[in-house]
Image (cartoon, rainbow, N blue to C red):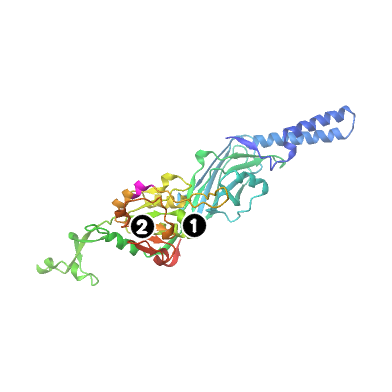
């Protein structure tokens, strides 16, 4: 594991040119027979030399693993981060800190998160980390060949992917003159997803649509042609479920228990760039992602499969398409990782309005497989021109917009806010 001197935090005394200069000056003053100065310079020289060698050696042979306790969580929940540290050498560590840069969404935060110092901002600007806040985890001293397990509790705040990649270990000499850094190895740099907030929505809207999507395709309802068993009659049982044949034979009153048929899937298409442009609506985009996540979770509780197609932006394109065979956790991870395309400007520094890009082949295939398909965007006039599918498939789409009173001719259109219930489940 490579380490380097953290020059912006270390004293100038521990730089090799300064150490060499101290030695030369002490010899020079000694040759000139100056009495006290060479002794003072020699003392400073030996302190600086020991501090430099100590700082360099302190970062050697440190084995560290770091990981999250879960793969994903929702805003408001606590996450336990575990560090396993092994000081595999004779030299003890007087102090050790973990420098934790945060993602731009500030998805996970400790209670003592702070603003970065000026010398830290230079490093953060070269990366994709947030310039607003960073975190430090201060660990106690380590004896020789000592192993420790340290845990920290952070709280999920905003949607996004938080990775340990880029986190650094800081340690140094006991004089506090030299500080060295080393990155946590990539093989131990796990990540965690903070999913969108789950809202209370009218999930029956999607269930009913799926049930009635196609003739002969029904949802989780009793199939009156397949009797699984019978049980004793209860006063709340519908009269139509009474087994009249057994009653005609003089047997006690009983109720039929029917087999259930699983529903067909729902398919959600999300146009993220429709929320941006010259007039940006980032908060509304987050609400739309929360709405989709809520629908996916609601359908999953009803044993109803769902599929996702997100517009291609600045994130892993493999996450933009989630077919119905994937678990709900995979879909929530894709929603957590979603980032729209970065803002681009022309030569006059005017913001360019770039239409969303889609995997149209995947969309066409899933629209044909799914019982009902929904297109989520900010408004009808912002739908991407790159959304190209056959007219007969497009006419079957239900458009869900954030902006009210916006419609697409020949299609059912719904406002997201009309599907919200009071309260938020997190």
Would you say 37 lies left or right of 376 here? right
Q: Residue furthest left?
A: 249
Q: Secondary structure at mark 2?
A: strand
Secondary structure character of the magenta stretch overall: helix
Magenta stretch? 359-363
Are there few (<14), some (14-19), or many (20+) residues within 10 Å of tag 2? many
Q: Judging from the image, what secondary structure is the residue with disc 1 in?
A: loop
Query: Camera-side residue: 390 or 228?
Result: 390
Q: Give whichever of 133, 110 is nearer the camera.
A: 133
Residue 114's spot in the image, x, y percent? 62, 53
Residue 288 in the magenta stretch? The answer is no
The quarter of the image holding the N terminus is top right
Task: Indicate the quadrant where residue 27 lies.
Answer: top right
> Residue 362 magenta-drawn?
yes
Q: Is residue 422 above or below residue 146?
A: below
* Residue furthest to the front: 348
Distance between the Cα atoms at labels 2 and 1?
30 Å
Mark 2 highlights which residue?
Answer: 374
Q: 268 above or below 30? A: below
Instruction: Identify residue for label 1.
Output: 77
């Amino acid at each position: 594991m490579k380490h380097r001197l953290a020059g912006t935090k270390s004293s100038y005394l521990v730089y090799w040119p300064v150490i060499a200069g101290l030695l030369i000056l002490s010899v020079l003053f000694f040759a000139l027979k100056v009495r006290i100065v060479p002794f003072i310079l020699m003392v400073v020289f030996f302190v600086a030399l020991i501090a430099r060698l100590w700082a360099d050696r302190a970062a050697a042979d440190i084995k560290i693993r770091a990981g999250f306790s879960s793969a994903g969580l929702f805003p408001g929940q606590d996450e336990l981060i575990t560090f396993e540290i092994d000081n595999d050498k004779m030299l003890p560590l007087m102090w050790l800190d973990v420098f934790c840069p945060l993602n731009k969404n500030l998805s996970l935060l400790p209670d003592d998160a702070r603003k970065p110092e000026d010398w830290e901002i230079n490093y953060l600007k070269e990366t994709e980390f947030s310039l607003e806040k960073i975190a430090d985890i201060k660990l106690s001293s380590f004896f020789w060949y000592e192993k420790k397990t340290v845990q920290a509790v952070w709280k999920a705040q905003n949607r996004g992917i938080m990775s340990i990649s880029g986190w650094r270990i800081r340690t140094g000499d006991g004089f506090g003159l030299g500080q060295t850094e080393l990155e946590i190895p990539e093989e131990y740099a796990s990540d965690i997803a903070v999913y969108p907030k789950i809202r209370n929505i009218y999930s029956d809207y999607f269930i009913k649509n799926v049930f009635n999507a196609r003739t002969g395709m029904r949802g989780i309802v009793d199939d009156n042609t397949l009797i699984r068993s019978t049980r004793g009659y209860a006063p709340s049982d519908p009269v139509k479920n009474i087994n009249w044949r057994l009653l005609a034979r003089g047997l006690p009153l009983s109720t039929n228990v029917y087999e259930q048929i699983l529903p067909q899937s729902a398919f959600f298409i999300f146009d993220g760039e429709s929320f941006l442009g010259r007039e940006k609506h980032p908060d509304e985009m987050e609400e739309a992602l929360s709405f989709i996540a809520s629908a996916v979770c609601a359908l999953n509780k009803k044993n109803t499969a769902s599929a996702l197609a997100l517009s291609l932006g600045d994130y892993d394109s493999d996450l933009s398409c989630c077919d119905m065979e994937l678990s709900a956790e995979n879909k929530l991870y894709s929603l957590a990782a979603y980032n729209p395309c970065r803002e681009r400007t022309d030569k006059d520094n005017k913001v360019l309005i770039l239409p969303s890009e889609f995997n149209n082949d995947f969309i066409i295939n899933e629209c044909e497989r799914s019982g009902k398909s929904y297109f989520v965007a900010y408004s009808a006039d912002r739908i991407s021109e790159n959304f190209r599918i056959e007219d007969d498939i497009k006419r079957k789409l239900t458009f869900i917009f954030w902006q009210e009173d916006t419609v697409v001719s020949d299609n059912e259109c719904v406002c997201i806010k009309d599907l919200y219930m009071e309260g938020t489940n997190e």
